[in-house]
């Protein structure tokens, strides 16, 4: 069974269009088509060509280009989304009767990761089968071409349930050769996938690092800005106190309110923080709502 699946995996990658970009990108597209076909069926592979190298592609454009209905398109995309192979943003669309329109992006890294897991589990199950073939005895009826494991053969007193013929001990060497070949092929596939995966991780890592650096620069600028505002406030305060007895000195107030300026800035920075946290959690909630609402829309 797993061998059949493996064949499908290879067939689906056989009809790749002529390469345009670098061979590495072609290799990635080929692998992505494999994984998409595996999750959503061979009819879904066209989505890879439409989404690869792009961001936030309108689902109506996808449906139009694939020449399928919007519901069929969404069903495919939801399947892919459940596996993390694609992500989306949604926007309210007046043209679409005020409904939300989804814009889709291919998650290359996650997809290749998914493919790695898939190939690894295939190798694992083939290796189990290989060990069984090496260790256990199998019997077969040469007339009916039926195979029995030792237990079943014993239970049937080494006679075939179909024709009653005597079961013969099976020579497993051909099966073992086939399994070895299949495992070897999958290992080669895996090496290619691993290489691609490594490159994507590196690339994505660089993007993340760049974003983090930009974020850090932004924070630094904000801190600097706050510090300057504080300084100005302090100077103002100092001037106000210099003006003398007409105005109440903040120091005279109880409860250490002298450091009012400082306190205010502390609370504002706290507020900012909780605001950020809030927006993060509301984002999560939003995502949940999106998921449930799109399910409802099915
Ligand atoms: Zn038989």
Image (cartoon, helix red, strand yellow):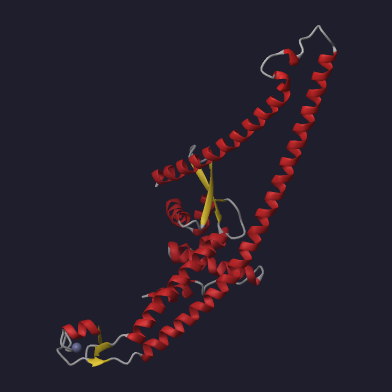
Quadrant containing ligand 1 reads: bottom left
Quarter of the image for residue 206 reads bottom right
Decide which of 297, 275 is in the foreground and name it.
275
Residue 216 coordinates in the image, percent (x, y): 71, 45
How far across and how far down the image is residue 99, in percent? 48, 39
Considering depth in this image, is 237 or 101 the residue closer to the camera?
237
Q: Position of residue 38 (x, y in %)?
A: 44, 66
- Please count the marks in the image: 0
Q: Quadrant of the N terminus?
A: bottom left
Q: Residue at x 21, y 82 (%)?
A: 152
Instruction: Mark yes or no: residue 222 visible.
Output: yes
Observer-nearest residue: 161 or 21?
161
**Residue 136 or 86: which is nearer the viewer?**
136
Residue 142 seen: no
Left or right placement of residue 250 versus residue 136 in this view? right
> Against 264, is 276 above or below?
below
Image position of 116 (left or right of 137): right
Q: Position of residue 175 (x, y in %)?
A: 37, 87
From this viewpoint, which residue is outermost toward the top? Answer: 246
Q: Residue at x 75, y 16 (%)?
A: 251
Taking the spot 53% from the left edge, 52% from the top edge, the residue there is: 87
Residue at the location (49% across, 80% down)? 185
Using the image, determine if residue 275 lies above or below residue 20: above
169 w.r.t. 204: above or below: below
């Amino acid at each position: 069974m797993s061998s059949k699946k493996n064949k499908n995996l290879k067939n689906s990658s056989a009809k790749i269009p002529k390469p345009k970009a670098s061979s590495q990108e072609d290799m990635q597209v080929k692998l992505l088509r494999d994984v998409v076909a595996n999750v959503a069926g061979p009819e879904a592979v066209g989505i890879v060509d439409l989404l690869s190298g792009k961001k936030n592609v309108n689902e109506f454009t996808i449906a139009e280009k694939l020449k399928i209905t919007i519901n069929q398109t969404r069903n495919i995309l939801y399947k892919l989304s459940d596996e993390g192979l694609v992500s989306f943003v949604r926007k309210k669309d007046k043209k679409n009767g005020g409904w939300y329109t989804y814009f889709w992006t291919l998650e290359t890294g996650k997809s290749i990761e998914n493919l790695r897991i898939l190939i690894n589990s295939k190798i694992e199950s083939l290796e189990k089968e290989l060990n069984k073939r090496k260790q256990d005895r199998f019997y077969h009826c040469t007339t009916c071409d039926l195979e029995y494991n030792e237990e079943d053969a014993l239970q049937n007193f080494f006679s075939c349930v179909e024709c009653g013929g005597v079961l013969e001990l099976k020579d497993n060497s051909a099966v073992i050769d086939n399994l070895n070949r299949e495992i070897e092929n999958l290992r080669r596939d895996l090496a290619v996938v691993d290489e691609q995966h490594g490159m994507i991780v590196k690339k994505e890592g660089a993007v993340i690092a760049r974003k983090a650096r930009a974020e850090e620069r932004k924070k630094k600028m904000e801190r600097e800005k706050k510090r300057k505002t504080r300084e100005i406030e302090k100077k103002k305060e100092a001037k106000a106190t210099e003006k003398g007895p007409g105005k109440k000195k903040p120091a005279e107030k109880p409860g250490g309110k002298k450091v009012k300026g400082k306190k205010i800035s502390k609370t504002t920075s706290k507020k900012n923080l909780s605001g950020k946290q809030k927006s993060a959690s509301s984002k999560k909630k939003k995502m949940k709502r999106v998921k449930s609402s799109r399910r409802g829309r099915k």
